[in-house]
Image (cartoon, rainbow, N blue to C red):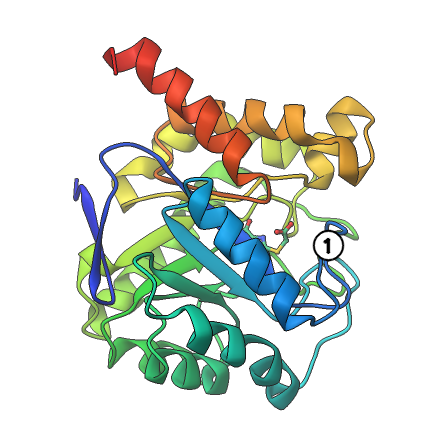
Amino acid sequence: MSEFLRCGRFRLDLRQPVVMAIVNVTPDSFSGDGHDRHFDVALRHAERAVTDGAAILDIGGESSRPGAEPVSEQEEMDRVLPLLERIVDWEVPVSIDTVKPGVMRAAVAAGASMINDINAFQMAGALEAVAASDAALCVMHMRGKPQSMQLDPEYSDVVVEVRDYLMRQKDRCLEAGIAADRVTYDPGFGFGKSLAHNLALLRALPDLVPLGPLLIGVSRKSMVGAITGRPVGQRLAGSLATALMAADRGASIIRVHDVGETVDALRVRAAVLFDK
Ligand code: 7PJ
């Protein structure tokens, strides 16, 4: 198992789980902290994430909330590129959360260290857009499309189907000439999955570890709301519980809104487990 991720000019140490900070530049963000495209607010948010201990920042310009409206390529670039250009020289890798090959090309040209695609680089030209760069990839499983994915997701065995899908995407990456130590895998919590599917996947994360480094996004998601009965602004405790359980089951990168709190939780875990 590779303990480092090649990630642009960085080499991300994954021997212990690290935190990826969500930095939304969308006016209609999933979790109520989208910044209405206000560059300065997003920038403050990114600065704070770094001081709070984020190992990588994930900038998103298109909401993938179930039912959200798609944005144009130009609009998405206008949201994410100014922020990327402003922070690209910081000593922390910057990921861009996008499904669009045009945005990917512009992002890697501007120095993005990772492309995080909830659509697993399925759009024509997406994989090629990143293959030619030195950026890392996050390949995520999604069933259906964000507009309709939560209507009635069905699987005969969600763990097997997600694992097989991610294995096929791994082969695609390798065939495109992308080195295995540039790719991370994500079961895609909440993307075309019922609560039972999400729980089965979290339980079975160890089955996915052989693929490569796992990236996990559960922060404030509806699965936490469904379990706790809490609205999106009150899901921190539930989200921290999922972060720790994901770490215990082999996750390498935990994608979250609440960076400082998650870093603290992982530090306590590390102290107990490894005496440090
Ligand atoms: C995920 C994501 C996730 C990855 C979003 C939200 C919805 N990218 N982008 N994994 N979720 N890789 O953050 O609540 O789970 S958008």
Question: Can the viewer see residue 224?
Answer: yes
Picture quarter containing residue 72? bottom right
Residue 228: percent from left, percent from top? 76, 23
Queried on whether the Cβ of the residue with tag 1 lies below 8 angstroms from ligand 1, the answer reads yes
Disc 1 element: loop
* Residue picked out by circle 1: 30
Above-or-below relation of 219 to 245: below
Total labels drawn: 1
In the rendered image, which quarter contains the C terminus?
Answer: top left
Q: Nearer the viewer, residue 72 or 159?
A: 72
Picture quarter containing residue 26? bottom right
Above-or-below relation of 112 to 82: above
Residue 96: percent from left, percent from top? 46, 68
Residue 85 in the figure: left or right of residue 258: left
Disc 1 residue type (three-letter): Phe
Residue 68: percent from left, percent from top? 77, 66
